């Protein structure tokens, strides 16, 4: 109970309850998350089940337009799948990849950032140079290259089978420098403080000091960057899928859905592209808004790194 | 200063070497050039002979040195699909991409500087708030979606602007340009807007926050106290000092822009390097893929080095701290 009360009185909760934008974003995000992760429950059709799909239903417009079918609220895509269900399933994949990629980045970034910040010297300059070079190539470019290489190396069929783990690895590898830099910057600031010195005098091992003392104290910049990075990862995944380097059309994410609908926009079927597009923007926007709010509240000055 | 420049250039060379090793390793491990060269009817013995003759059985390092020697002469392999040197293929496609990046960069500078400065000087005004919240929405819009929306509105609904291709082009000394014909310019509008849409919010926010920080400093207060005219304080005193970080970020963002040309060019079927790269991926044209990697890597490294040197020239602190 003590913790709960502490949380109730905290500045964190206070500022959250007094920011309408933050509340709205969180509510929308939660709704999207529940709808996405619970897609099999909420979706009226199962887009992966080929037996229920009829190609004759392809390109049915949304209900409120001429020729709409009440069976398919938002219409159907070019293969006759219910667009609403496909979008939900697609969002589930996007969210899974986004969160997975951020976990991967966090894992790499935190370990390398801690090492660089705490050990200093050669390891630090090597890792940070590497991060600089990789960042100067832009994470997008690195991700595109990595998945292009993965695809040519493993073959398209194999890649499509394993698309989700592959994409998590690709996006994770492409974006770790952002994390490592933030972690390093905050470790450098924490390292100079007295409690670290005290811990060292007691004779704790460097590992223990890094994990149990420094890391918990540099959590707030990590939290802020994690939110922004989820949005970035979702965006990268969508971009890769849009280029045909990500999720296959049989198991579409929002990006591949937009891609598959793009050809049909010229024949008037705008809904296949635009509905998933708006869902994607909404998802990224609410995460970004929450990230902005978090940054203002926690105000980690090290954010610029 | 001289030592600083030399060190930067050495660093650039090291990075280029690393990129070339990566590129070469990809080339070695993905795809088999012998299978690309020969038909089915060629026997195994003949293939092996060809392999030895082409030097594909040599140790990795020897082959790498050979690759590097050719690369310095500008020969980075043969495109399997085009049956032409990869460098030549890239150079014919590069003008299209560079024109697109150039136009977007101009659009970004023309828009972000006035909006950012205005938002910093009058942070409370409606327009500034609008620009700021607009920029958050802008950041959340994936570039390909902006492009698709633009195509939908301007090409399909309104039918005013063309939706794909470069239109009519003029060739001047081997540089195929779309900037000189009306049709080419029309084709350029939508891709330019969508490419700049991704960077514009970022720059507006950056310029605004840097400018606001500078406006708080003592020397600006002193300038006010001296009674200097407003525009002089804003543009001569304050704006100059906001430029420094903007230049550095701008350099890094140029790389991002080239990455995003891949997306814009796909939507608009723009016959540039990005479109070529995706085609190369689809055709498993490893050679062209690696050539693209090295070419784009070289552009990034050059731009970053030049920006670092400019930064060093403008800001002596960088040179001095770098020396220790």
Image (cartoon, rainbow, N blue to C red):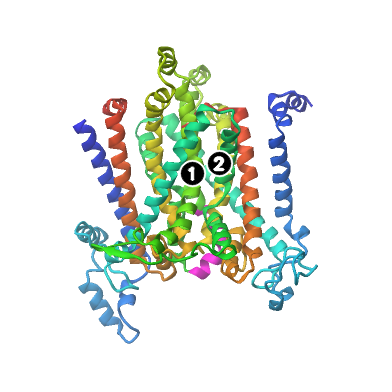
Residue B127: percent from left, percent from top = 58, 35
Q: Chain of mark 2?
A: B
Residue A71: percent from left, percent from top = 79, 68
Where A251 sits versus B190, above or below? below
Callout 2 crowding tier (Cα within 10 Å): few <14, some 14–19, many ≥20: many
Query: Which residue is more in the foreground, A49 or A211?
Result: A49
Residue A207: percent from left, percent from top = 50, 31
Residue underneath mark 2: B135
Query: Which residue is more in the foreground, B69 or B148?
Result: B148
Residue underneath mark 1: B200
Q: Is residue B38 magenta?
A: no
Residue A166 visible at all = no
Q: Chain of mark 1?
A: B
- Secondary structure, mark 2, is helix
Q: How many marks overall? A: 2
- Secondary structure, mark 1, is helix
Q: Is residue A162 magenta?
A: yes
> Which residue is at a point 37% across and 61% down the rendered structure image?
B273
Judge left or right: residue A175 versus residue A69.
left
Judge left or right: residue B249 versus residue B3.
right
Where B216 sits versus A224, above or below? above
> Which residue is at a point 37% across and 42% down the rendered structure image?
B251
The secondary structure that most of the magenta stretch takes on is helix
Residue range (magenta): A156-170
Where A256 sits versus B258, above or below? below
Judge left or right: residue B19 versus residue A53.
left
Query: Which residue is more in the foreground, B71 or A213?
Result: B71
Sequence order check, earlier mark of 1 and 2: 2
Q: Are marks 1 and 2 in contact (CB under 8 Å)?
A: yes
Q: Which quadrant holds the N terminus of chain A?
A: top right
């Amino acid at each position: 109970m003590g913790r709960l009360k502490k949380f109730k009185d905290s500045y964190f909760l206070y500022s959250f309850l007094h920011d309408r934008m933050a509340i709205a974003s969180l509510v929308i995000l939660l709704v999207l998350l529940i709808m996405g992760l619970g897609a099999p429950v909420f979706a009226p059709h199962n887009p992966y089940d080929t037996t229920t799909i009829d190609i004759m239903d392809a390109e049915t417009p949304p209900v409120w337009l001429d020729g709409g079918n009440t069976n398919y609220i938002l219409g159907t895509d070019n293969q006759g799948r219910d667009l609403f269900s496909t979008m939900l399933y697609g969002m589930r994949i996007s969210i899974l990849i986004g969160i997975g990629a951020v976990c991967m980045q966090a894992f790499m970034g935190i370990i390398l950032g801690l090492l660089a910040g705490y050990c200093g010297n050669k390891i630090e300059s090597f890792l940070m140079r590497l991060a600089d070079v990789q960042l100067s190539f832009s994470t997008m470019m690195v991700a595109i290259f990595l998945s292009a290489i993965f695809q040519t190396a493993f073959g398209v069929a194999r890649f499509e089978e394993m698309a989700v783990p592959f994409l998590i690895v690709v996006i994770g590898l492409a974006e770790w420098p952002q994390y490592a830099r933030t972690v390093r910057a905050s470790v450098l600031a924490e390292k100079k403080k007295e409690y670290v010195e005290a811990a060292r005098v007691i004779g704790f091992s460097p590992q223990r000091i890094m994990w149990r003392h420094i890391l918990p104290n540099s959590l707030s910049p990590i939290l802020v960057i994690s939110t922004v990075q989820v949005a970035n990862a979702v965006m990268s995944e969508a971009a890769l899928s849009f280029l045909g380097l990500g999720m296959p059309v049989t198991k579409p994410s929002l990006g591949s859905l937009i891609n598959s609908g793009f050809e049909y926009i010229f024949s008037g079927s705008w809904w296949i592209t635009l509905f998933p597009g708006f869902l994607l923007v909404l998802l990224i926007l609410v995460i970004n808004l929450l990230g902005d709010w978090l940054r203002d509240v926690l105000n980690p000055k090290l954010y610029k790194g | 200063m001289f030592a600083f420049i030399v060190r930067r250039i050495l660093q650039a060379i090291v990075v280029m070497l690393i990129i070339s090793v990566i590129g070469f390793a990809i080339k070695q491990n993905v795809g088999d050039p012998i299978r690309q060269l020969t038909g089915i009817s060629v026997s195994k013995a003949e293939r092996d002979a060809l392999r030895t003759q082409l030097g594909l059985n040599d140790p990795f390092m020897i082959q790498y040195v050979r690759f590097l020697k050719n690369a310095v002469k500008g020969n980075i392999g043969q495109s399997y699909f085009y049956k032409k040197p990869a460098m030549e293929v890239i150079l014919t496609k590069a003008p299209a991409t560079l024109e697109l990046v150039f136009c977007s960069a101009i659009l970004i500078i023309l828009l972000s500087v006035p909006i950012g400065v205005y938002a910093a000087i009058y942070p409370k005004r409606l327009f500034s708030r609008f620009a700021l919240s607009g920029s958050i929405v802008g950041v959340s819009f994936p570039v390909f979606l902006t492009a698709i929306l633009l195509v939908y509105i301007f090409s399909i609904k309104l039918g005013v602007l063309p939706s794909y291709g470069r239109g009519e082009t003029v060739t001047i000394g081997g540089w195929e340009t779309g900037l000189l014909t009306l049709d080419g310019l029309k084709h350029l509008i939508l891709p330019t807007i969508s490419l700049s849409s991704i960077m514009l919010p970022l720059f507006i926010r950056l310029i605004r926050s840097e400018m606001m920080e500078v406006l708080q400093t003592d020397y600006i207060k002193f300038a006010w106290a001296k009674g200097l005219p407003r525009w002089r304080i804003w543009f001569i005193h304050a704006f100059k000092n906001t430029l420094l970080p903007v230049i550095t970020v701008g350099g890094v963002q140029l790389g991002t822009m080239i990455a995003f040309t891949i997306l814009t060019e796909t939507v608009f079927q723009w016959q540039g390097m990005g479109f070529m790269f995706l085609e190369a991926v689809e055709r498993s044209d490893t050679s062209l893929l690696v050539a693209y990697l090295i070419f784009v890597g070289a552009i990034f490294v050059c731009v970053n080095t030049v920006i670092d040197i400019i930064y060093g020239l403008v800001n002596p602190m960088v040179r001095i701290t770098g020396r220790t």
